[in-house]
Image (cartoon, grey):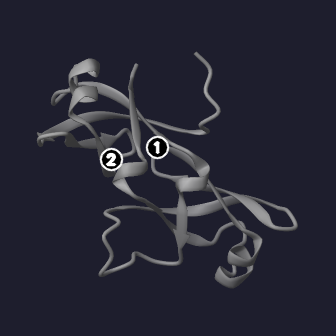
């Protein structure tokens, strides 16, 4: 199956916490970072997710935000430090490729944000991703 989701990062499930309808799944990415995905309890069962399972974390580029540093006092727990590898700038929107440990993330952000953050190749950034915007796929 081919997907239009550019951000596909391999990892291993380290914990699953199930609730009535939703579950949180902690994943250690191959680069060593940990992220949390909030998915349905049904999906946990359908995918057979448990500690040790290998997965791919999938995130649409429009769901990746960028900051100049780790953000304190925010509900977004997935904060991956990296370095801007490349920027493709358009009139309204830009595509920013961020090198993170173990791979690359692409963020689709406004061109105004690129300028306001002073982004350029080599700039340190932190990729922010809400847990509800991460999907998981088994390999």
Assign the N terminus to one quadrant of the image: top right
Q: What x and y, as percent, mark residue 40? A: 27, 36
Which residue is pictured at 45% across the width and 50% down the height? 101
Which residue is pictured at 19% across the width and 39% down the height? 21
Residue that numbered label 2 is attached to: 32
On screen, residue 24 above or below 5: below
Which residue is pictured at 20% across the width and 22% down the height? 45
Name the image quarter holding residue 46. top left
On screen, residue 35 above or below 55: below
CA gap between label 2 and label 1 equals 8 Å
Q: Secondary structure at mark 1?
A: loop
Q: What x and y, as percent, mark residue 54? A: 31, 25
Is 74 left or right of 86, judged from the image as shown? left
Is 108 left or right of 139, judged from the image as shown? right
Cβ–Cβ below 8 Å for labels 2 and 1? yes
Instruction: Tell which residue pokes out farthest to the right in this image.
Output: 91
Residue that numbered label 1 is attached to: 102
On screen, residue 33 above or below 76: above
Q: What x and y, as percent, mark residue 70? A: 40, 75
Q: Secondary structure at mark 2?
A: loop
Q: Dot 1 surroundings within 10 Å: few (below 14), some, or many (20 or more)?
A: few
Name the image quarter holding residue 78. bottom left
């Amino acid at each position: 199956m081919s997907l239009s989701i550019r951000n596909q990062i391999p990892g291993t499930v380290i914990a699953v916490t199930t609730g009535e309808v939703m579950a949180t799944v902690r994943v250690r990415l191959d680069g060593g970072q940990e992220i949390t995905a909030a998915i349905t309890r049904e999906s946990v069962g359908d995918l057979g997710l448990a500690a040790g399972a290998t997965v791919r974390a999938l995130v649409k580029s429009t769901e990746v935000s960028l900051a100049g540093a780790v953000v304190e006092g925010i509900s977004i727990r997935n904060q991956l430090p990296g370095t801007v590898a490349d920027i493709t700038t358009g009139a309204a929107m830009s595509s920013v490729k961020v090198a993170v440990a173990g791979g690359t993330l692409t963020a689709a952000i406004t061109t105004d944000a690129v300028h306001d953050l002073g982004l350029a190749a080599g700039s340190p950034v932190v990729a922010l991703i809400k847990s509800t915007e991460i999907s998981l796929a088994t390999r």
